[in-house]
Amino acid sequence: MDTVNNVKSSRRRISTTVAGLTGLLFLAGCATNAPQDTWQAKGPNAQKISDLQWIVFPIAGVVGVLVLALAGYIMFKYRDKGQPIPTQGHGKPTAEIILTIVPALILTVVGVFTFRAIFELAKTEDTEMIINVTGQQWWWEYDYPVQTELGINTPIISSGQLVMPVGTKVLLRETSRDVIHSYWIPALNGKKDAVPGRIHLLRLEADKPGIFAGQCTEFCGLSHANMRMEAVALSKEDFAKWVASQQKAYTSPADGTLAKEGETVFLNQCVRCHQVNGLKKADGTPALAAPDENVYSGAAPNLSHLMSRNTFAGAMFDLLRKSCRADVWDATSEEFGAKYLAGVSESCLNQTDLRAWLRNAPAMKPMYADPTKLTKTGGKYRGMPNLGLTENDIDKLVAYLLTLK
Amino acid sequence: MFTPSSKYFVGLTGIALVSAILYMFLINPSDLGAIALFGVAASSALVAGFTLFTRDGDAFTDEEAVAAATYAPGGSIWPIVFALGAALVLTGLATVPVVFILGIGVLFGAGLEWTIQNWSQRASADTAFNSFVRERAIGALEYPGLAAVGLAIIAYLFSRIVLAVSKEAGPIIFIVVAAAILVVGILISQKPALRGRVTVLISTAAVIALVVVGVIAALSGERHELAVSSEEDHYSAEHRECEVAASEHYDHLANNQVSLRSAVTATIFVEDGKLRAQAIGIKKDIDTITIPRSLGTTVIFRNLDETEHRLVVNLGSHTVAETGVKEKVGTCTQLTGKKQEQALTLTIPKPATSEEPYFFEVPGIEGEIKLVVP
Amino acid sequence: MAIIERPSSEVATPAVVAPSQALGAIRRPVASKGWRSWLFTVDHKKIGIMYGVVAMVFFIVGGVEALLIRLQLALPDGRILSADQYNQMFTMHATTMIFLFAMPMAGAFANYFLPLQIGARDVAFPRLNALSLWLLVGGGLILNASWFLGGAADGGWFMYAPNSGPVFSPSNGVDFWVLGLQIAGIASLIGSINLIVTVLNMRAPGMTLMKMPVFTWMILVVQFLLVFSLPVITVALVLLMFQRSYGATFFDVSQGADPLLWQHLFWIFGHPEVYVLILPGFGIISEVLPTFSRKPLFGYPFVVFSGASIGLVGFGVWAHHMFAAGLGPVSVAVFSISTMAIAIPTGVKIFNWLLTMWGGKIWYTTAMKFAIGLVVLFTIGGLSGVTHSVAPSDTQQTDTYYIVAHFHYVLFGGMVFGLFSGFYYWWPKVFGKLLNEKLGSWNFWFMVIGMNLTFGPMHILGLQGQPRRMYVWTEARAGEGLFNFGFWNMVSSIGSFVLAVGILFFLINVVITARNGKQAPADPWDARTLEWLATSPPKEHNFDRIPVVHHLDEFFHRKYEEDPNTHTMRQIATGEELIRAEEAAADSDIHLPGPSYWPLVLAIGIGVLGLGVVYGTPVMVVGAAVVLLASFGWVLEPSVPEAIDYASPDGDGHSKEIATHG
């Protein structure tokens, strides 16, 4: 009896070791610091999911190793060694019933944990801040409804980077203007689809300041691969500074500068779709963009305070040069806030991509922006067309955009 | 192989096909002419097939010759139906096109039936066999055709009845009729004794009832609301009258139930004569509702007051190009009774100017809820 | 004689004409050799082979698409395909593999072996069987014609609304996709009704349902799944067709539609479809494992009922494809649990296969290797499936490469390995020649290694956050260290070519076997089920005499007998002897259906009718005319070819007549 138990337990030990080793091998095979790694939770919601995964994956791993070991054993033991044809038995119901009940029990355990986690993750009553997130082919718009207790007295509108305070339960209210998108910041929570005509809720909360990468994960057409997002968590003080900077009034560049000429180019070309809050036409009336008349889905990124963001074109390109970007991404959580709030300076601007984008946007990111092929959209674009700007115009525009802090 | 009349129809098919294709590519890309020509081709192909198949109804083998010789013509309904078709065609030419098309259909059907009957009665000397070949040749067309016509009549008459009775009675009639059909079906399948005469009797009674009631319903016309709303476009934005008082047109058909819940951004309440608003995720009442631009967003208005109210949204003004007059832009819900609610879906393309901010108000109630489009 | 004169009694000798003569002009084709014998055949075996050929062609098409995808993704910012081309490529890869390879290939096996396994001479409706083949070919051609007519569908095989609408997918690709799938859907629906009737009505005497081979059982379950799930996708496709071609607004949000409607409709079909794909593979290896273990299947009733319950529960788990779609926690919890529940019958199957081998005398042929490969790979895929039945965990995994890894382990490891096992096992039955075992071994090992190299790394890629359906991946999100995304994407791409070489070995094997393969023995595997009682390849009428069944594994029990003392099995006859005995006792009067032109004509008509949706109403009218013509031909053609149509009448005493149906 004892020996049997010993044999059994040593077998169990072996299989656990094998499972562990496989797990380790798997972990060793992973990239370090993958920005979208689902196993590196940086907030309580993602942590809940991660905890659950640490239950399910080991169970699946152990079961897998056991079954495969059994298969290997059978394959070796019962190979044809010239033994006679075995008795034609048709199975043992007791074995069947045991083999049905055991997996059922294991799954019940998993099910209980799952059930609890689902409802915990769906909780929204204790929300501390809301942000509207609107998907559109192929970028995300963030707008912050008036929340006076957070210092948001006029709505803030932004795109490319979601900025939020740490340690705050932020509720995203997701929807879409055209097709279904999906919002996913793996370090903070699982994904949730942004469906047109519906508002879906997703809770994010970050433990420490930092920047977290994400990616649209519901196939949304041509440039789905280029629809990225970044979530930025700032300490509460830094977030207040950010809010203040976003509510700062517009200041027109000084007369006679290159940037002022850039403002004119912007008024002639860009303002057809892109709003800059506070920008006025030459006659002093507000320059209201009309993306609804030119873009099929109805909006284009609002460019007020563009240079306070680090990305453009649906977070596909960085506004920061490589070294400056690395400086922000690799910053410690103490330094991060200051570095992020510094925004994009002229020396740090990623001139190459920004200029190429202004020169011919559809060449940089696949979009439906060929003016000859807009029959089904009633002449409206889906994405930014080639504006045919001269190099001179581009110089001016870049100088102007740099003033949009 | 080709008999004289089949040659004619095969030729007709060919000509119609060629002209249809030429028509499509050379004359007009519009579908109608091509469909007509293709239709001619298809129907003459069908007739060609039949004449080929029946060899013009001529004797082919010796046996058939004998059969033809012993051929005893029975009664036939088709000449009179054919005549009816001709009459319909003529009437249709003078009156409405529907009758003309109906006449063409009857002519075609009667001609086909006549031909097949004539042929089948001479197929052999065995009448049972003759009726068998007739069924075989024409049954595949007859039954689906009759079924389609029958179903069309039933569906049309039933729709007349449901449109004529009140909105509440419609579903009840539907449920009762469906249940009755189910019960009768089960009874017939379970009690073979009921088959035969009883079934025929019940079906006949049902059909007669349907026809009588249907005709009456069709004559009496659709129910009042439908008639009114199809006459005048009372639900469109232009007809909305957003005053305190009840609007004669816009309000009198209000349906104060909202089932749409998936895209509600905020709820506005009137309670104890005061206006307040709530949004998902914010615990306290809000005084500003933020709506992203160019995005259809729904706001729910719930009235907890004793009196009826409506929610009005003001979206600035625009200048009418022809007259130069400034007109208010905005919309409103219908009057909403106590503990009832209505939804207002807004798609706002542009932010407000500082001179003319957007806001919600409830006429007769103090205060407003700001509406901001960033 | 005047026509109105009534016949006198003397002439009353009824001049009855034979029906076929009276109904004249339409005749049955008679060719038994050459291309005509294939085009107009209603023989389930010929149709089965054609299904196989068609499926194999599409397997290669879909495989090339897969290789292009992997080439594009081998390096960051790939430039082999444009975004548009890539989106078409992955849409068509999935559509082709599922609808034009996996289902038809399972159909090939089902068509060929199901009547043989139940001791029937043909399926219940032979002409419908031919119709479903030709409709499938038509659907496949329409689907793939879109490549040359302005671009293929680009919305993913799931074709989520509203991205599939006319504005968001302006080319005609989605139209062709909708039509192709509707036509292929008609084919599947007809086929499934046909096979259900065949199994229920045409089993050999003595074969109760619980004496039916497991392959037949699994095919039966699959047909029921199809009958209940295809109508749902058909509804969805019709809605989409009306939205795209006729201005309907079923999925137009501005008109009040809810785009989740499409997702529900699609997955209510789409999830049972997964079992439609996998169960035939399960069925095949449930034949192969016992044969080469020399033991009956362990727990036959449990395997049968677990298959049936997988089918049943499979209708209750669709929303696990929508855990991230915002259904609300209650729905998510319910579907999460039901998804876990489906793992139980699946686990039962795996244990039963392992216990079938337990205590056996295992003969490692290529067929057996593929079968064991299925058990192993499917176990891995099944377990990764359990990890995303946990809904919160799935919100991190869904739409990443982890899912791609999961379902390729399940479908490639589970289904394709099953099909290849079936190829090696039944090739001698179909063609009378054994596939080369040595090449088979190369084939197997390249496929196993290639498959694991291709799809194994995708687990890591997905868990580390590489989403699927992206035409490029960027180094900015690839992580650092040796094992970053670049490394694993490259491994995966190399693996896909190893896999392709493995499949090439199979094709080479087929060619070599066809050229110089030797005649296979009558019973090369010492097999167990009825199809081996027929000759290889089987005669046109399958069985010289309809077998009477007494056992599960009837053929085995005719060969072996248990020694009452030692309880070991003793051979009492060889397979060859049994086959000869059947031939000697052949039935004298065998009824077989005659070939027909009309299934092919009808399929062409339906195809043209479908094209009318894209190319305008006149084309539709032409299609409708052909459909009408073909329907009449179908109804009116004589039940048998006329004797005078044969070049030389049969002299062997077997009369050829049709069954009354068909």
Image (cartoon, coloured by chain):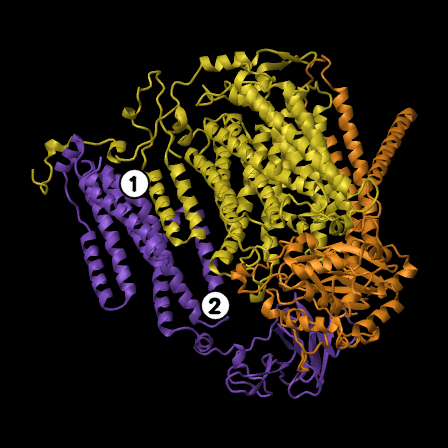
Chain colours: A orange, B purple, C yellow
The amino acid marked with disc number 1 is Arg
The residue where tag 1 is placed is B136
The amino acid marked with disc number 2 is Gly
Q: Assess whether mark 1 and mark 2 are in contact (beta carbons under 8 angstroms).
A: no
Q: Is residue B181 left or right of residue C345?
A: left
Q: Residue at x 61, y 28 (%)?
A: C504
Q: Which mark is residue B170?
A: 2
- Element on which disc 2 rests: helix
Q: Nearer the viewer, residue A149 or C191?
A: A149
To the question of a shared chain for discs 2 and 1, the answer is yes
| Residue B50 position by quadrant | top left
Specify whether residue C352 is in view. no
Circle 2 chain: B
- Residue A323, compared with residue C227, is above or below; it is below
First in sequence: mark 2 vs mark 1: 1
Q: Is residue A47 left or right of residue C291?
A: right
- Element on which disc 1 rests: helix
Q: Nearer the viewer, residue C274 or B370?
A: B370
Whole-percent x and y of residue C75? 72, 42
Whole-percent x and y of residue A31? 82, 43
Q: CA distance from mark 2 to mark 1?
A: 42 Å
